[in-house]
Image: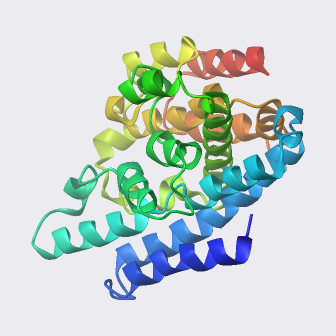
Amino acid sequence: MNRINDLITFKQYYSTAAEKIPADSFFHETLNHKFRHSIEVLHWGQYILEHTPELRDKDNFFRDLAQKALLFHDVGRFEEAVRRYETVQNGVNLTDTLQLCDHGRIGFELLQNRPSYNDMRILFSLLWHGKMMEDVVNSVMFDELKDTPYFKETMLILRLVRDADKLANLRVNKELDHLRQDIFYKQLSAEILNAPISTDVMNRFLSHQVIISSSLRSFADRIIMVISWFFDLNYKISKKIFKQQHYADFFLEMLSQYHKNPRDITQIKDCINHEL
């Protein structure tokens, strides 16, 4: 990977967006967070690459594609922040801008127009890294991809990006208490903060499925959603890091502050331990 050129290109996307948003805006800090996050995802991805034989033994061309996908996976977040900022300026509530646009689609379209990055092994990860895997495999694009000679490499890179993305987010949520520092947390009503895990979310978790954000009904649901990311980790080293960093213990302790049923907490813990 020509890291210097890629970093320069990546920073240009950031700078273009930053010029359109005041420095004291919530959305400007979002830009800064996503810039730092993307660099961290690149680092986690490189670590996974070096500790996973099926990735480590690939040629330099594959590694270059993988590292580009890691760095640029969230490049669409910059334009997304601009659109959300401009929408809020027009009087729309901040919460109502969450579903304003698809950052994966934005990133896909941006890099599709750049010859150095217009490779499906990169673009597929940008488009699908934030989607549920069942949506990925049921998509028309996935069906079309299966008939190509680069299908296997595309999926290896997608799984790599998904793992690195989750490891970066888990670290931030644990070390910076990001779930409770988030502006949306501070807007939650007492009713939602004190509500238990909803039945549908609990059942999905106990079925070893990742929780989808649209199913969340309480802050307890949001915590268990983060824990459920474990089920979407693809590489052995990623699961090892999850265990070494005690993420399950940390988030279960947090969960117990909002969901007051110790038996449920034990059941969730046993579900994770069975997989570890």
Colouring scheme, one of rainbow, by chain, secondary structure, one colour: rainbow
Q: Nearer the viewer, residue 182 or 135?
A: 135
Above or below for 70 versus 24: above
Position of residue 251 measured from the top left corner of the image (x, y, whole percent): 63, 39
Position of residue 175 measured from the top left corner of the image (x, y, whole percent): 69, 58
One can see residue 39 in this view: yes
Above or below for 38 versus 233: below
Position of residue 56 measured from the top left corner of the image (x, y, whole percent): 87, 42
Residue drawn 63% across the image and 45% down it: 161
Position of residue 272 measured from the top left corner of the image (x, y, whole percent): 70, 21
One can see residue 197 in this view: no
Above or below for 147 versus 121: above
Side of 25 where 121 appears, left or right = right
Residue drawn 52% across the image and 43% down it: 120
Quadrant containing the C terminus in the rendered view: top right
Quadrant containing the N terminus in the rendered view: bottom right
